[in-house]
């Protein structure tokens, strides 16, 4: 099962990589992980441990597939939500303990997968010394847009906040992962066949995810948000640093504040103001993860329009489960 995934091409020869496929240097491994997944905190669970990392990747354009292992036991946390990415982690060897929805955890063994939208919920994992993963990285917006096109509506946070295990060695999902790995040798960004493979992966993932979340993607009551809601979201993401007023957001969307507020509550379950606050917190979290040695929490908060630092710290802790100062210290 996927023993040679991403290792060999159609002729049985080693696949060429644009990066080092193996490394024992923490900086090189962290750089690979930051690009392939997103920024996050890495803690080695063995004293003075050095990695013996496996790092193979294959990019379809909308899916980044990676064959990855640290080669040492690790605990990963603080996945950066501003990266806007979904992780699908399939265990090939060893075991992974994942933060599950709620306060517990679940483990995956060989042939089992786990999906988490790191842009919508917090996440951590703990990997065994012999772990090996076949991972997919997909942008949240890519999956949401696909769902909107396929099902006429994108699911809400009832799906995106669900962290769940799915599949097994004999599942259709694993069969699809084997096909994706084999198809990699003949992938063409302009090929209709390649586009169909991506669609199959998205559809199978969403169906498994929705089943475990108790959601019926095909139900007729799932309504698509009006175009002006999506236009408002795009406007707020693009102008978050300027802290636009709701009058400005509504004007950019072509509707009244009342109409926009009602639509947001109906189709997104939050107010437009709450959506904008979320964007500010996401950007502040990202900047704290990437802050230079001389940059303070106060400077980051001010950049994103916070005058009351106590309010910022309180909102940050409610959203991410820790104070901004703790994130700053951990990545200093």
Image (spheres, rainbow, N blue to C red):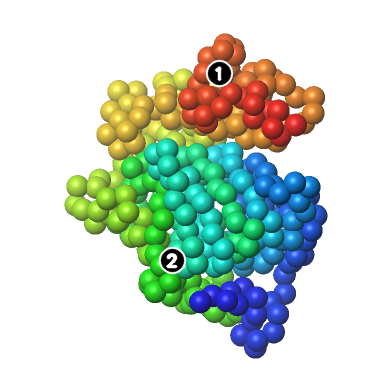
Is there CB contact under 8 Å for labels 2 and 1?
no
In the image, what residue occupies the spot 19% across and 52% down? Answer: 220
In the image, what residue occupies the spot 65% across and 88% down? Answer: 11
* Residue wearing tag 1: 312
Q: Secondary structure at mark 1?
A: helix
Q: In the depicted view, which residue is nearer to us: 130 or 42?
A: 130
* Residue wearing tag 2: 201
> Label 2: few (<14), some or many (≥20) within 10 Å?
some
Q: In the depicted view, which residue is nearer to us: 19 or 317?
A: 317
Name above or below for residue 222 compared with residue 9.
above
Image x and y of residue 69, in percent: 65, 61
Q: In the depicted view, which residue is nearer to us: 143 or 216?
A: 216
In the image, what residue occupies the spot 64% across and 18% down? Answer: 302
In the image, what residue occupies the spot 72% across and 21% down? Answer: 296
Name above or below for residue 74 compared with residue 71.
above
Image x and y of residue 80, in percent: 58, 40
Which numbered disc flags the more N-terminal residue, 2 or 1? 2
Q: Quadrant of residue 10?
A: bottom right
Q: Secondary structure at mark 2?
A: helix
- Whether residue 235 appears in this view of the structure is yes
Residue 162 image label? none
Image x and y of residue 93, in percent: 56, 67
Name above or below for residue 215 compared with residue 283.
below
Q: Quadrant of the C terminus?
A: top right
> Label 1: few (<14), some or many (≥20) within 10 Å?
many
Image x and y of residue 201, in percent: 43, 66
């Amino acid at each position: 099962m996927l023993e040679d995934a991403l290792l060999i091409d159609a002729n049985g020869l080693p696949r060429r990589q644009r990066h080092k496929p193996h490394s024992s240097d923490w900086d090189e491994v962290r750089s690979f992980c930051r690009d392939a997944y997103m920024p996050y905190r890495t803690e080695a669970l063995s004293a003075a441990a050095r990695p013996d990392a496996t790092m193979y990747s294959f990019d379809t354009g909308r899916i980044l597939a990676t064959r990855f292992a640290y080669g040492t036991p690790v605990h990963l946390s603080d996945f950066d939500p501003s990266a806007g990415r979904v992780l699908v982690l399939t265990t090939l060897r060893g075991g992974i303990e994942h933060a599950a929805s709620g306060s517990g955890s679940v483990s995956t063994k060989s042939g089992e997968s786990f999906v988490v939208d790191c842009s919508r919920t917090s996440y951590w994992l703990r990997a065994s010394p012999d772990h090996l993963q076949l991972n997919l990285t997909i942008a949240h917006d890519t999956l949401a847009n696909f769902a909107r096109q396929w099902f006429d509506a994108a699911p809400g946070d009832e799906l995106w906040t669900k962290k769940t295990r799915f599949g097994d060695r004999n599942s259709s999902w694993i069969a699809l992962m084997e096909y994706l790995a084999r198809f990699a040798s003949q992938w063409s960004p302009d090929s209709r066949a390649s586009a169909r493979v991506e669609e199959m992966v998205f559809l199978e993932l969403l169906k498994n995810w929705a089943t475990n979340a108790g959601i019926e993607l095909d139900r007729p009551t799932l309504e698509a948000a009006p175009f002006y809601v999506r236009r408002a979201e795009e406007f707020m993401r693009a102008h978050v640093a300027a802290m636009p007023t709701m009058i400005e957001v509504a004007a950019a969307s072509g509707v009244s504040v009342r109409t926009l507020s009602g639509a947001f509550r109906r189709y997104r379950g939050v107010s437009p103001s709450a959506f904008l606050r979320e964007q500010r917190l996401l950007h502040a979290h990202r900047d704290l993860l990437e802050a230079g040695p001389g940059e303070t929490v106060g400077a980051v908060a001010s950049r994103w329009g916070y005058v009351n630092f106590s309010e910022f710290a309180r909102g940050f802790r409610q959203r991410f489960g820790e104070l901004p100062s703790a994130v700053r210290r951990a990545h200093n």
